[in-house]
Amino acid sequence: MQRIALVVLAVLLAGLPIGWTGPTVAAQDTSVRVAITSPPAGASLQGRVVIGGWAVDPTSPDGSGINPRDVQLWLGAPPGGYLLDYAQYGEPSPQATSFYGPRFAEAGFAQNWHTCSFPTGPQELWAIVSSLARPGERDFTKVDVSIAPCPPGTELFHADWRTLPPLVTEQSEQGEVDGAWMVRRLRPGAAGRGIEGLYANFLAEITAQRVGREDGYYFIDFRVLPGPGDTLTDSFYRFSVHPASGRFRIGISRPGPDPIEDLTTWTLSPAIRRGTEPNRLSVEADGPQIRLYANGELLTEITNSELPWGKIRFGAATGDDFTTEAQFRDFVITTLPPR
């Protein structure tokens, strides 16, 4: 993410114009173009919104010419802002079609965003794209919006495992079992399940339970920021619980192959139920303040401002044994409760 931010910053410092927002396109214009069509400039946002727009490289001999894996959405301009997410590219776009012709009919992008957990007030929403047809060519644009507050304790997500398809690979098996989500790791390592949405300040709660005799731990990853490549380039916090020993820890993962860095080391807590007993785990993220709970009791509170928001996922990882299994129930995410 830092590499991308520096590239965009260099363009900004070069004094180039910011994106394109005009109603027409000159026939001879061959520049890479990106436009945000939703939300409109000046909009007050509350709850679920769709960030939408389109992007083209008119010189592309085939297709839209845009890198579909590099349609970045930011809150605030790099390097002071933060990556919000990567948009889904390849959506129908009547606007791009009308400006550039039918070859660009699927040059649109879209991404769902639930604003309720995000800081309120004015925000700059940026879109940054790169060209496949001409590597190194980029464009960017922004709209000014305002985020309105939502009531404390507003439910943002409530898992219904029956609506999720099973996930089966050579390394793991996942699926709904008796009203719970089962994660079975078949080889040493970790397996997890992500859920929809982006979350900044929130309370997330889930009941986790180890199944069987194989050693392992379960975890909640939060404020997961996707990197430019595979999951090894993601950044995230991880709250881990090892029920066999009654210990927990929180760490941070930065892009690259380095292991997760401890923010607190493995710590024994009598609040954690041992063995195969279920544990109700909670993460409360409020700006840089992060609080972790087990069964309603505070485990620790730390301060770390590296990751302001992101996705949330949960899962299980092996310990001393080669395999492990856990089940998860009653996963709920809300805005922060009233103080």
Image: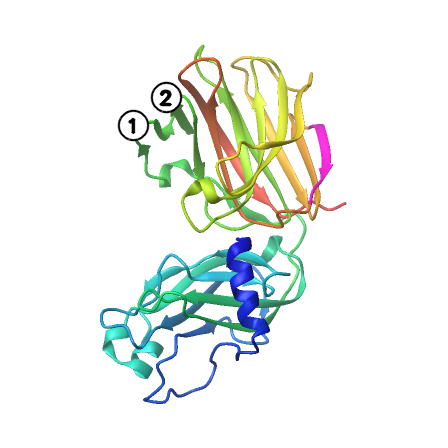
Residue carrying label 1: 170
224 or 160, nearer to the observer? 224
Residue carrying label 2: 187
Please tell me which residue is depicted at 45% across the width and 17% down the height of the picture.
211
Return the residue found at the far right: 339
The three-letter code of the residue at mark 1 reads: Glu
Where does residue 252 sit, x and y in percent of width and height? 60, 37
Note whether 212 is above or below 29 in the view shown. above
Mark 2 vs 1, N-terminal side? 1
Where does residue 2 sit, x and y in percent of width and height? 55, 54
Dominant secondary structure, magenta:
strand
Where does residue 149 sit, x and y in percent of width and height? 66, 60
The three-letter code of the residue at mark 2 reads: Arg
Q: Residue 95, labelled with which disc?
A: none
Please tell me which residue is depicted at 38% across the width and 71% down the height of the picture.
55
Which portion, as a residue range, is magenta? 297-304
Note whether 88 is above or below 54 in the view shown. above
Where does residue 52 sit, x and y in percent of width and height? 43, 67
Please tell me which residue is depicted at 43% across the width and 66% down the height of the picture.
129
**Tag 2–tag 1 contact (CB < 8 Å):** yes
SS category of the residue bearing label 1: loop
Please tell me which residue is depicted at 55% across the width and 68% down the height of the picture.
10
For the residues labelled 2 and 1, the Cα–Cα distance comes to 8 Å
Q: Residues within 10 Å of mark 1 (few under 14, many from 20)?
A: few
Q: Quadrant of residue 269?
A: top right
